[in-house]
Amino acid sequence: MVAEQEDDWAPLTPEQLAQRPWEAQAPVDAAEAGFAEVAPKPKPIAPLPERAPEKPLSACQEKMVRDLQERVAKAGPGNSLIAQVQRREQRGQRKQKAATRVAGQLAATCVIGEAPKAPEPEFEIEKQTDMDPRELEPWFQELPEVERQRLRERWTAERHKFDHTGKAWRSRMKRAAAYGTMSFAVTGLLMSFLFMDLMVLVSCLIVGPFAGMVAQLLGGERFTYGLLGLVGFVAAIGNGIMLPFAWYGMIFSIATMAALGMDGEMRRAAGCRDD
């Protein structure tokens, strides 16, 4: 007993100093201690609860579900980050499905072997087209695009140089006749009240178009229109020109016709179209 106590007080070796406190204790053998090893009993697995049978929804509950679905449909897609990620993933899946479907269709319609050669283009000139035959010549195809466009415009202008011959002249004559008719109609209406005779109006309506066209043929200036206003008024009134109040109508006719001639001069001086 004394020897064991002396051994307990003996200095520790370096191996014992390196051990942890719980490692320094000697392991206890269960068989020497008289303990029997007992295997752990398995725990019993509890059975899953049975699912309750589904109950049919009442009319009020169905109405609430429909209202909720309509509200969700009206709200539209969400703007949150999760919703954007979901839409991006769904869009990618749809693209992948479409690509797979198109690849299958292309594989089904693929022609095995050499493809037939495309026919060589044949240039033909139709009567309905406005194409110059020189555009099909090899030297024209070798020119730059800017030069080819310039030649096309030049050839087109040469072909259509006389297409609208007389159109502008006819348009000017129609406008001059309308101006003369309008001027002499107003003058004839005023003189018919003074002369108490509607034939004055009829004669002015007949003379007016001719006075306007003759004024346009003589140059279409304000003095020409004014002179034809005087000549036309004398021709329309006839012997009534000697009456005192006829002089007022003559001055009115000259002034209105000269104003119409001034309008044409201003158009031409400003560079406006006179057709």
Image (spheres, rainbow, N blue to C red):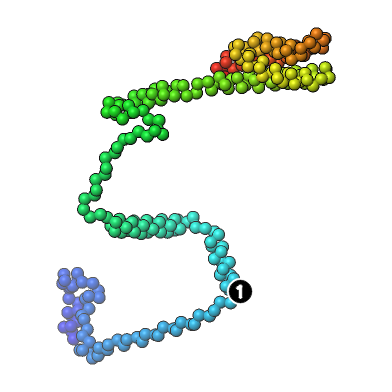
Q: Is residue 23 visible?
A: yes
Q: Which residue is mark 1?
A: 60
Which residue: 56% across, 19% down?
169
Residue 15 image point, x, y percent: 16, 71
Residue 83 lies, in percent from the top left, at 45, 58
Q: Which amino acid is tagged 1?
A: Cys
Nearest the camera: 66 or 180? 180
Residue 183 lies, with reference to residue 23, above or below; the image says above
Q: Nearer the viewer, residue 45 or 49?
A: 49
* Label 1 Cα neighbours within 10 Å, binned few <14 / some 14-19 / many ≥20: few
- Rendered location of residue 159, percent (x, y): 41, 24
Which is more toward the observer, 61 or 39? 61
- Going 60% across and 13% down the picture, which residue do you hit? 217
* Residue at point 27%, 42% (across, down): 119
- On the image, which quarter does residue 181 sit in? top right
Q: Is residue 13 left or right of residue 106?
A: left
State the residue at coordinates (63%, 13%): 215
Q: Give the quadrant of residue 144.
A: top left
Task: Examine the rendering and report whether any part of residue 255 can be seen.
Answer: no
Q: Quarter-wise, where is residue 68 in the image?
A: bottom right
Quadrant assignment for the C terminus: top right
Q: Is residue 257 above or below residue 20?
A: above
Q: Secondary structure at mark 1?
A: helix
Residue 154 pos. (x, y %): 39, 22
The relative height of residue 1 versus residue 141 in the rendered view (above or below) is below
Q: Is residue 257 left or right of residue 77?
A: right
Q: How many marks?
A: 1
Task: For the N terminus, give its image quadrant.
Answer: bottom left
Query: In the rendered view, does 252 fall on the left or right side of 120?
Result: right
Q: Is residue 225 left or right of residue 38?
A: right
